[in-house]
Amino acid sequence: MVSNRRDVFDAALALPDVDRTELIERLLDSLDPAHREQIDAAWAEEAERRLAALERGDVKAVAGEAVLRSLSRGQRP
């Protein structure tokens, strides 16, 4: 049993990607529906903001595979 919040975070971060994804989904599902609606709205707004920045040319797209390769080497994409 984990004893404090930091232990929980560290244990969660040590999980494989698939398990972390499931954990995230289960935690989000456990939230009050009103909070979930706020979170979903915030993510939708962020997605729209990022898409607009991409369309304006303020940022450039990077292939997901390239990002994952950089991260696996401990580098920032």
Image: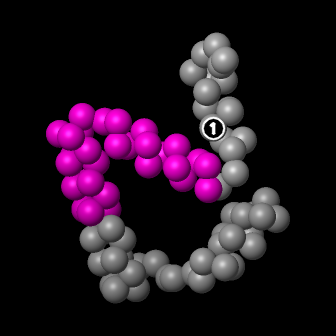
48 drawn magenta? no
Name of the residue lying farthest toward the right: 73
31 drawn magenta? yes
Which quadrant of the figure contains the N terminus? top right
Name of the residue lying farthest toward the left: 34
The local secondary structure at tag 1 comes to helix
Image coords of residue 71 (percent x, y): 72, 64
Is disc 1 surrounded by few (<14), some (14 to 19) or many (20+) residues within 10 Å? some
Q: How is the image coloured?
A: one colour
**For residue 63, side relative to residue 68 (left or right):** left
Q: Amino acid at mark 1?
A: Ala
Front residue of 51/30: it is 30
**For residue 42, side relative to residue 65 (left or right):** left
Q: Is residue 43 above or below residue 35?
A: below
* Residue at 59 percent of width and 83 percent of height: 63
| Image mark count | 1
* Residue at 61 percent of width and 49 percent of height: 19
Front residue of 59/25: it is 25
Image coords of residue 33 (percent x, y): 21, 40
Residue 66 occupies quadrant: bottom right
* Residue at 46 percent of width and 78 percent of height: 59
Read off the residue under disc 1. 12
* Residue at 35 percent of width and 43 percent of height: 29
**For residue 43, side relative to residue 37 (left or right):** right
Assign the magenta stretch its main secondary structure.
helix
Q: Is residue 24 above or below residue 49?
A: above
Image coords of residue 24 (percent x, y): 48, 46
Q: Is residue 13 above or below residue 50?
A: above
Which quadrant of the figure contains the C terminus? bottom right
Q: What is the span of residues highlighted in magenta in the rendered image?
A: 18-46
